[in-house]
Amino acid sequence: MYGLIGKGLSHSFSKEIHESLGNLNYNIYNLTDLDSFIRNNELLGFNITMPYKTEIIKCIQQMDSISKETNSINTVVNRNGIYYGYNTDYYGFVELIKFYNIKIENKRVLVLGNGSVAKTVIYALKRMNARKIKVLARRIIDKDEDLLENYDKYLDFDCLINTTPVGMYPNNEEYLPLDLTLFENLKIVIDLIYNPINTNLLLEAKKQGIKAYNGFFMLIMQAKRAHEIFFDVDIPNNLAIKIYYRLLKKMYNLVFIGLPLSGKSKYSNLISDKLNKSLFDMDNEIEKKHKMSIPDFFKKYSEEVFRKEETTLIKNIYKKQNLTISTGGGVIENSKNIELLKQNGVIIFLNKDPNQIAKKEIFGRPLIKSAHDVLNLAKKRIPLYINACDILIDIDKDTVYHMYEIEEKFNEYINY
């Protein structure tokens, strides 16, 4: 048997990753006491995550050179009662840098955090010949570090890497206290968090036109290296890359936005079946909750109350993954809604010609009583849809064509 040990692992991807690599005897172990686990477990090998990557060292008889240098172990093998410790995070991080073709040599790099992962990252950056490395943390533990609040002294740095858990599930709403708009030369932001897919830090970086990457590829590659150590085998990188893309495609939510009658419910239903994702239709959920139709809701309450209901729904689901989400047409009017949905979602704008919508027989739409209402709504919302979307689909052909187009553009988005 094999597994992952740590705390708060209910949403770990490690079991699925290792099973994809061929290890069907891999499980998750939430610990409260590391010493008790070491005394009583019968595992042949295991991985370690927070908060035990340094504490595990006291239990290890043999360590690889990287573990000694970084004072961090995340992979252990039991060979005839002797524990051998390895740092495969190093391999995962190096492979992430290679995969995204990130240039570190002669660059100035800010590392946020000073825990065990930070030490591994720093060790790798030095070997990649970074020009300068500076560690910023909330609490200084080394004389060469600085407080995070003093980040404005380093606004000329080229790359920023977050190794802290700030913004990690379930605390998705957390922000790091720094303003990316102040950085003069920042070209790359890496956040080693992978749940959510896009932390607030990464979303802000993308908004500023900065290339932004999460730590999911690092997770896959460190697991690949751990599997190789467990079973003394070699796994080709292209297999691990295929696993990466398959799981990333599964993780993402597909969020459909657009005008009323543009096809959001239809396409979210069809895509959920095709990609085996769970369906979440916001209008349907509001109707079920209040036991009344949307027009009746508007009559009894108001549009303002309805928009608050939409935001409440989004706050309840944005941390989830592997959904197709059909939104109400007005979700776009609150920018916070889109920020939350982008953490785990690809925003798909179904751009149907409002003149075509206006020709339809319209009923059951509280904000649309005439063709004129459709055109006014379009004038107000279409610029917002375009600004928010990751994928734009012009709805001007048949359903089969657009189903193919949505899936193709989703694949392109992930591969990019």
Image (tube, rainbow, N blue to C red):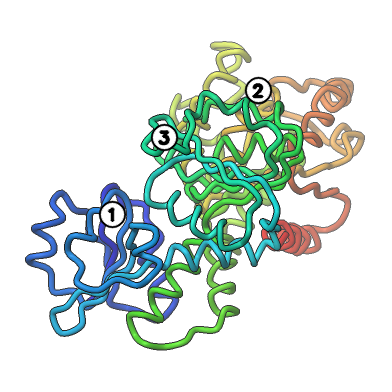
Expressed as whole percent of the image width and height from the top left, the position of residue 68 reads 34, 64
- Residue at 28% across, 48% down: 51
For image coordinates 78% across by 29% down, the residue present is: 384
Mark 1 or 2, which is nearer the eye? 1
Residue 337 picture location, percent across and down: 60, 29
Left or right position of 119 against 35 = right
**Residue lying farthest to the bottom in this orientation:** 233
Disc 1 to disc 2: CB gap under 8 Å = no
Marking on residue 334: 2
Name the image quarter holding the N terminus.
bottom left
Identify which amino acid the numbered label 2 is placed on.
Asn
Q: CA distance from mark 3 to mark 1?
A: 24 Å
Q: Which residue is mark 3?
A: 171
Eye-nearest disc, 2 or 3: 3
Q: Amino acid at mark 3?
A: Asn
Give the image location of residue 110, x and y in percent. Answer: 58, 41
**Label 1 packing within 10 angstroms: few (<14), some (14-19), many (20+):** some
Q: Residues within 10 Å of mark 2 (few under 14, many from 20)?
A: some
In the rendered structure, which disc, 1 or 2, sits on the residue that comes first in sequence? 1
Residue reaching furthest to the front:
143
Secondary structure of the residue carrying numbered label 2 = loop
Residue on which the image places disc 1: 54
Circle 3 packing at 10 Å, graded few (<14), some (14-19), many (20+), is: few
Residue 4 location, quadrant? bottom left
First in residue order: circle 3 vs circle 1: 1
